[in-house]
């Protein structure tokens, strides 16, 4: 294993978000193994929090305690956070854009999303604007994205693809039933 991949493995083991070397593409076998290690480490951390009740406090946003950055996107940064009111880990998406129209639109979308209950749609637990930043917190889903699963797989059975397509179609139909449209459907956004 290269030093760059060893550094990724150490960050994952320490509960930090991995920084993937540019030379390691998602089709690399070691990359797939490290993604599985990351999912396993995440599952153990979630089990530990559930067992202890509350993690140690860290920096916060509102009442949420930020644990680590777990993703970046066009909308904002996604953090693993702890909600002491719900006594559970959540995913907190903090928006990059703090302008008033974007903030108002994000809050309106969060209110509409919070009404949706479907087994294949992420449950929204809350949204707020604090210090000019909009944040939306939701279930923290364990496991791997479809992008990671496909990269690690040597082949996917047609029946599995049909199962995934059916689940995705059902989720999108429910979102559309509530007058919403998902604007960023891609394997990296599907768990």
Image: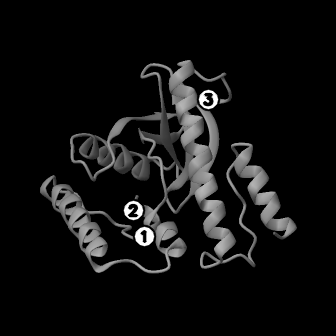
Please report the residue visible at 65 percent of the width from the left and 42 percent of the height from the top: 68
Q: Residue at x 12, y 56 (%)?
A: 177
How many other residues sit within 10 Å of disc 2, few (<14), some (14-19) or many (≥20)?
Answer: some
Is 34 drawn above or below residue 89 in the view shown?
below
| Mark closer to the observer (1, 3) | 1
Q: Residue furthest left?
A: 177
Q: Quadrant of residue 86?
A: top left
Image coordinates of residue 113 in percent, x first then y, are 27, 46
Name the residue at 62% across, 45% down.
41
Q: Is there any visible trace of residue 62 in the rendered image?
A: no
Question: Which residue does the numbered mark 1 point to in the structure image?
Answer: 187
Q: CA distance from mark 1 to mark 3?
A: 30 Å
Residue 82, relative to residue 52: is it above or below?
below
Tell which circle, 1 or 3, labels the residue nearer the N-terminal end: 3
Where residue 42 appears, x then y in whole percent?
58, 44
Q: Quadrant of residue 82?
A: top right
- Residue under numbered circle 3: 60
Q: CA distance from mark 2 to mark 3?
A: 27 Å
Tell whether label 2 touches label 1 (CB within 8 Å): yes
State the mark number for residue 190: 2
């Amino acid at each position: 294993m290269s030093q760059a991949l060893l550094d990724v493995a150490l960050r994952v083991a320490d509960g930090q978000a991995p920084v993937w070397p540019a030379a390691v593409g998602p089709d690399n076998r070691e990359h797939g193994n490290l993604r599985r290690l990351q999912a396993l480490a995440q599952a153990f951390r979630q089990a530990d929090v559930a067992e202890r009740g509350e993690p140690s406090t860290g920096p916060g946003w509102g009442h949420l305690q930020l644990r680590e950055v777990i993703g970046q996107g066009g909308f904002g940064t996604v953090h693993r956070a702890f909600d002491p009111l719900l006594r559970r880990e959540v995913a907190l998406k903090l928006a990059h854009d703090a302008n008033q129209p974007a903030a108002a639109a994000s809050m309106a979308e969060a209110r509409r999303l919070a009404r949706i209950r479907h087994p294949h749609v992420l449950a929204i637990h809350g949204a707020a604007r604090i210090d000019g930043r909009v944040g939306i917190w939701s279930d923290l889903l364990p496991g791997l994205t479809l992008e990671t699963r496909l990269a690690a797989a040597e082949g996917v059975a047609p029946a599995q693809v049909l199962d995934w397509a059916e689940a995705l179609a059902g989720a999108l139909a429910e979102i559309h039933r509530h007058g919403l449209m998902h604007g960023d459907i891609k394997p990296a956004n599907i768990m």
